[in-house]
Amino acid sequence: MRVLIVGAGIAGLSFSAHLQKFGIRPKIIEKAKSFEHIGYVLGLWSKGFDTLAEFGVREKVEKLGYESSVFNIRNKEGKITKKLHFDHLIKKYGPVILLHRADFHELLQSLNKNVPIAFGISVEAIKQSESTVLVTFSNGEKEEFDVVVGADGIHSIVRNLVFGTSFLHYAGIHGWTYMVSPRFSFPKNASEIWAGGRFFGVYPDQSDKLCTIFAKKMDAHAYRYNNHADYLKKEFSDFGWIVPDVLSTMTDESTIYHSTWDEVTLDDWYKGRVVLTGDAAHSSVPATGMGGCMALEDARVLAEELAANETAIALKNYAEKRKDHVDMVQKQSEFIDFLINIESSFGMKLRDFLLRFIPSALIVRDFEYLLSG
Ligand SMILES: Cc1cc2nc3c(=O)[nH]c(=O)nc-3n(C[C@H](O)[C@H](O)[C@H](O)COP(=O)(O)OP(=O)(O)OC[C@H]3O[C@@H](n4cnc5c(N)ncnc54)[C@H](O)[C@@H]3O)c2cc1C
């Protein structure tokens, strides 16, 4: 079977690893000239990385990452308003590991030593007939495939070319990730400040750097700053806790990664012999921290289906097996995102009051719902 994977991210590389189990050696193209090691810390649930258990990934992830069982929600001053304990979930579903995206990506690359990645290549055109897909690459070359898999992330070119351009929606948030080498003592647990449309999160991993995320609710085109550090220092100047220390270390613009936070929703993930997976099919706002897991789960199901069935049936089964669960994760992410970004002072007070009195176990139960599916 001739399979083209467009995009060598979490979805593409994990899918390729599974395909090789079945003796299928795909072609992988990647738009980037090399893998940039800028990024953030991923909270990876066992449900995700256990899809790669047969490659010994669990042991490696546990060694590389930082196990987290407590998650703190704080107010603007940094006072903890809710401590969420995940021990019960961890006992039942395995650990949540915080690890740097680049480390996980390297691990996925190590599972694909036999499949060369063609870097610096994108797709220009896709034309399909009943029996094949003809792809024109950005270097002018053309090649035929039996299946084309769009694993090219939130701004998927495969989605745009084959499905249309109307499936990407701005979620109302601008986000900035920043890795800091702290001059202050490290917080031991993941913590987030939820403060009226403004957000600050810290996610410790095993390295000597601390991953921080700033986010702000605003209109899509309202952000016109060239200098992110200046903007963040101004916008978050009234935050307490470790935020002033973090802001004071921002001197190098190239270490701050800015993007809008968007969602992808489309009913059909495949058309003929072209199929979407991971963020290309269903990117969510990162509130539940499950996008990576969803990509990993997609990858296993899609590979198993393609190995077992004729293409049309395989793609139909893949979408049927994955869609309901992914929809649920997207909805839950939207709900948490709504809670984080409540702006009115009454709404915030009510949220914080309810959070204080609702037992942690009850809130965490929502995640059980997502993990058990
Ligand atoms: C701030 C933030 C925090 C997050 N935190 C978490 C978390 O804690 N836990 C979690 O599980 N998830 C988290 N996520 C989500 C997670 O990062 C994504 O869901 C995951 O990376 C999706 O993987 P993917 O392979 O589908 O897409 P990507 O990782 O985006 O990979 C797509 C790949 O395709 C390549 N590509 C793009 N266009 C083309 C093209 N035209 N041709 C060829 N190649 C192309 C890209 O260069 C890239 O290598 C977070 C996301 C954000 C933004």
Image (cartoon, rainbow, N blue to C red):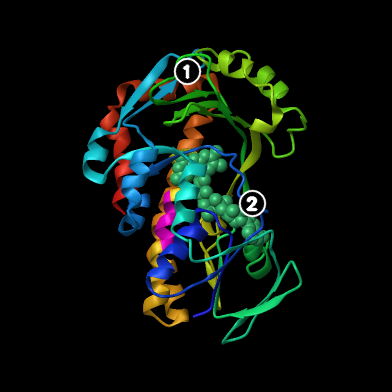
Q: Residue under circle 2?
A: 34
Front in this rendered view, residue 13 or 162? 13
Q: Is residue 323 left or right of residue 357?
A: right
For disc 2, the neighbor class at 10 Å (few under 14, some 14 to 19, many from 20) is: few
Alpha-carbon distance for marks 1 and 2? 40 Å
Front in this rendered view, residue 342 or 290? 290
Q: Is residue 176 left or right of residue 18?
A: right
- Image coordinates for residue 277, horizontal then vertical, percent: 51, 61
**Residue 239 in magenta?**
no
- Image coordinates for residue 254, horizontal then vertical, percent: 69, 33
- Start-end of magenta stretch: 293-299
The numbered mark, 1 or 2, whose residue comes first in the sequence reads 2
Under mark 1, the amino acid is Asn
Q: Is residue 367 left or right of residue 200?
A: left
CB of residue at label 2: within 8 Å of ligand 1? Answer: no
Q: Residue at x 73, y 33 (%)?
A: 223
Under mark 2, the amino acid is Ser
Residue 321 seen from this side: yes
Q: Which mark is residue 75?
A: 1
Secondary element under disc 1, as helix, strand or loop, is loop
